[in-house]
Each structure stands twice: as structure tokens, then as C-alpha cells.
């Protein structure tokens, strides 16, 4: 039987937490709060009943879970595609080729800053690019319908949150985009004050079979961070986040028997 183990464990932890606050709290009381039958909840908690996505959605409303938290609890299995930013619009590769340079997306996000000015010189200076680059990017974004202007002439990001297929596939243009982002990260390492950046790394041992789940956790984290940053009271700068998880060992090659 397939069930959602992360969500089931969350329910078990929630039951334990509420039980600590009230030693008379029971599965029946928890079921009443969740608005399901006690027998159904007992089977779910015991792993004897399939916890479907629909049931997770239903229970999440009673638990007041945020969409991001719910997504983080939804199990990923090897026969399901990675849930690459489900709330983000998808940019197909043929369109991404036209606007693959890093500053296209920086311009779109820049329109959301509090001090934004729809002025080529202002945009170019803010991103440290040429006015020609800024002009070309703006015209292409307009042509694709990703950038528009309001009645006052202010540029408006109509693409909103988006991602490309780079989390599922790769190509020369996607690799080049990531190289640009990594280059910006190297530049920030030398030029940006330590207090204004976070650049760290970790080397860890792991199970290759859990890589798909690890990818999903990274995607969930990135989307959660996007929500967190946007929900702040001020929008004064545009940031770039790049996360890399890759093998630095090759034990399969090392363990091959000599011929």
C-alpha cells in the first residue's frame, strides 16, 4: 500500500504535541478537530490506510497548513515527475533561449522593488549592465508578453514567478544560464560585503537512491524561500539563489574489479 509517510509522521507528531498540552487529548479528539472519522484517522496513523493527495489537501485545511508546508509534506516517488515549482509559470525552452541571460529575469524582479524607475539608465546602473543590454532585454520581454506598462508608464512584470525545465532536463542554453549565475556568485564572493550575502557549502555522504527525494526537498526549500522573501514589508533589492548538489566521488568506478 502506498501512503504519504511524511504527512503521516506529521500527523503523529501533531497528535503527540497536542497530547502534551492536554493529557486527555485522544485520537478521537484529534479526529473531531480534523473532521474525519476516528477509525479512519486511526488507520491513517497506523499506516493501514492510503493517505491520498486529496486527503492531504482536506486535512491540511483543518491543520491550517500553508501551501508551501503542504507541498513539503507531499511524498515524491520514483515513478512520479519532480514537482518543480508547481506554483511557478513554466517557460518552455524555445522561449528561454531568447531570454536566457541572467539580466532578463533580474529586470523583471527589479520592477517589484520599491525604488524602481522605468528608465534605461537607472535599470542599467542598478544591474551593472549597458543601456544597450537593458534596451534589448526590455523590448524582447515586451514582445513575449512578459513585461508591460501601466497607465503611468511604469514597467510591470507580467511573467510573475516562473521557472524553466532546467530542473528536469538540460541543454546548452540552460547550462550557459547556470554558468552566468555561478559567475555572478563568484563576483559577489569578492565584491559583496559578507553581511549582505550567504555563500556556504557542505560535503556529505548519502544514498544515491534518495537523490530524487533530495532534489524535491531543495525545490521545496527554494519555493518556500521565495515566498518568505516576497512577504517582507520592503522590496529594496533583487537577489539570486543558486543551489548545487552533485557527486564529488565515483565509488562505482573505484570498486570495479581489475581486468
Image: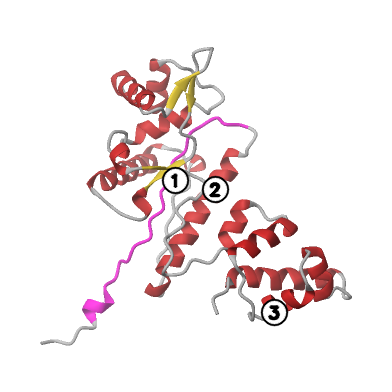
Q: Position of residue 20 (x, y in %)?
A: 82, 72
Quadrant of residue 215 within the rendered picture: bottom left
Residue 236 lies in the magenta-colored region: yes
Distance of mark 3 from mark 1, alpha carbons?
41 Å
Identify which residue, 15 or 124, lies in the foreground: 15
Q: Residue furthest top?
A: 152
Q: CA distance from mark 3 to mark 2?
A: 34 Å
In primary-sequence order, the first of circles 3 and 1 is 3
Is the residue under label 1 in contact with that under label 2 (CB below 8 Å)? yes
Name the disc covering residue 225, or none: 2
Q: Residue at x 83, y 74 (%)?
A: 28
Magenta stretch in the rendered image: 234-254
Identify the element where label 1 is drawn.
loop
Residue 226 appears left or right of 82: right
Front tag of 3 and 1: 3
**Mark 3: which secondary structure?**
helix
Residue 50 in the image, given as x and y percentages of width and height: 61, 74
Place residue 119 in its image quadrant: top left
| Magenta segment, prevailing SS (helix, strand or loop) | loop
Q: Is residue 32 above or below residue 207?
A: above
Which residue corresponds to mark 1? 241
| Secondary structure of the residue carrying numbered label 2 | helix
Q: Is residue 132 left or right of residue 203?
A: left
Sequence-wise, which precedes: disc 2 or disc 1? 2
Q: Residues within 10 Å of mark 3 (few under 14, many from 20)?
A: few
Quadrant assignment for the C terminus: bottom left
For the residue pair 165 and 79, the one nearer the viewer reads as 79
Instruction: Name the residue: 36% across, 49% down.
Output: 165
Instruction: Report the disc number at residue 43.
Output: 3
Task: Check residue 47 for magenta coloring.
Answer: no
Residue 168: horizontal and vertical position, in percent?
35, 56
Amino acid at each position: 500500500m502506498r501512503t504519504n509517510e511524511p504527512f503521516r509522521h506529521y500527523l503523529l507528531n501533531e497528535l503527540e504535541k497536542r497530547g502534551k498540552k492536554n493529557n486527555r487529548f485522544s485520537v478521537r479528539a484529534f479526529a473531531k478537530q480534523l473532521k474525519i472519522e476516528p477509525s479512519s484517522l486511526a488507520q491513517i496513523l497506523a499506516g493501514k490506510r492510503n493517505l491520498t493527495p486529496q486527503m492531504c489537501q482536506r486535512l491540511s485545511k483543518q491543520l491550517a497548513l500553508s501551501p508551501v508546508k503542504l507541498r513539503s509534506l507531499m511524498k515524491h516517488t520514483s515513478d512520479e515527475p519532480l514537482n518543480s515549482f508547481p506554483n511557478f509559470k513554466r517557460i518552455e525552452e524555445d522561449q528561454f533561449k531568447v531570454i536566457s541571460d541572467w539580466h532578463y529575469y533580474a529586470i523583471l524582479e527589479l520592477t517589484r522593488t520599491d525604488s524602481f524607475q522605468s528608465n534605461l539608465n537607472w535599470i542599467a546602473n542598478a544591474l551593472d549592465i549597458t543601456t544597450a543590454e537593458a534596451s534589448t532585454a526590455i523590448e524582447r520581454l515586451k514582445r513575449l508578453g512578459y513585461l508591460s506598462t501601466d497607465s503611468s508608464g511604469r514597467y510591470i512584470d507580467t511573467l510573475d514567478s516562473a521557472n524553466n525545465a532546467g530542473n528536469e532536463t538540460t541543454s546548452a542554453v540552460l547550462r550557459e544560464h547556470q554558468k552566468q549565475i555561478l559567475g555572478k556568485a563568484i563576483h559577489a564572493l569578492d565584491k559583496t560585503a559578507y553581511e549582505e550575502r550567504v555563500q556556504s557549502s557542505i560535503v556529505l555522504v548519502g544514498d544515491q537512491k534518495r537523490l530524487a527525494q533530495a532534489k524535491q526537498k531543495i525545490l521545496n526549500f527554494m519555493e518556500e524561500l521565495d515566498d518568505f522573501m516576497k512577504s517582507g514589508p520592503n522590496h529594496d533589492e533583487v537577489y539570486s539563489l543558486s543551489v548545487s548538489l552533485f557527486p564529488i566521488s565515483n565509488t562505482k568506478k573505484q570498486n570495479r574489479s581489475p581486468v
